[in-house]
Image: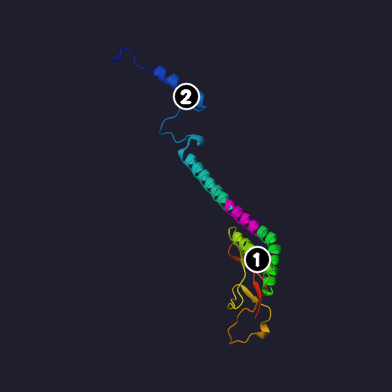
Amino acid sequence: MTNDKGNAPHSDTSNNNLDENLESAVGVEAQDEESPSVPEAFNLKVIQAELEDWKEKSLRLAADLQNLNKQHELDIQQVKKSTKKTILMPVVSFIGVLNLAFTFTPETKDDKTTKFIDTLKSSLQKVIDDFKTYGVEVIIPEVGEEFNAEYMNILNPNSVDQDQQVLVKQIVSCGLKIDNQLIQPVSIMV
């Protein structure tokens, strides 16, 4: 018997050969669809459970990596801030001493001395402005400015009455902020 293409139809022997090839390739006997004894490796529920387990593990790993990256960034920021502080504290002390020296500058009619002092003041201001580009703020209040407890420290608190307005009379040392965090308050006399 032939089909409409002229080929012989598949016989039971070809189906048996297919089953035998499947058995040898997979290593199990071919089973009916209704057969309840499917090997565990081919059980869809087991595969889905393993897939869910791997999915949970990968999500946990991704979350752990994200947390590790965040902690790494925080550590880097802390090291940067600490390095800035270590490097800048002596510079800020020098700026404070230089600023204090400017308050004791005598009045002079000597044009060369006046130009020299003005050049020093403008150079100091340039350094302070350059620090701002790196997130560093040197705080130097003006004499006569009102006391601000957020960034000032009074060195002679006994001379202050509760009811009086407190004004800066002298700046003893400059203040320092790094990345908007106060590192050193301004020390003043009132």
Q: Is residue 70 magenta?
A: yes
> Which tag, 1 or 2, sits closer to the chain's start?
2
Occupied quadrant, residue 111: bottom right
Q: Is residue 189 magenta?
A: no
Q: Count the marks: how many? A: 2
In the depicted view, which residue is nearer to us: 66 or 142?
142
Amino acid type, residue under disc 1 in the picture: Lys
Occupied quadrant, residue 141: bottom right
What is the span of residues highlighted in magenta in the rendered image?
Answer: 68-81
Residue most extreme to the left: 4
Disc 2 crowd rating (10 Å Cα; few below 14, some 14-19, many 20+) is some
Occupied quadrant, residue 167: bottom right
Residue appearing at x 70%, y 65% in the figure: 94
Amino acid type, residue under disc 2 in the picture: Leu
Q: Position of residue 33 (x, y in %)?
A: 41, 32
Vertical comparison of 112 with 56: above or below: below
In the depicted view, which residue is nearer to us: 79 or 84?
84
Badge 2 element: helix
Residue most extreme to the front: 110
Q: Which mark is residue 91?
A: none
Between the residue at mark 1 and the residue at mark 2, the CA separation in whole angstroms equals: 100 Å
Residue assigned mark 2? 22
Q: Position of residue 153 (x, y in %)?
A: 65, 75
Disc 1 crowd rating (10 Å Cα; few below 14, some 14-19, many 20+) is few
In the depicted view, which residue is nearer to us: 64 or 36?
64
Q: Position of residue 187 (x, y in %)?
A: 66, 74
Vertical comparison of 58 with 148: above or below: above
Instruction: Provide the major secondary structure of the magenta segment.
Output: helix
Scheme of colours in the image:
rainbow
Badge 1 element: helix
Residue assigned mark 1? 115
Q: Quadrant of the N terminus?
A: top left
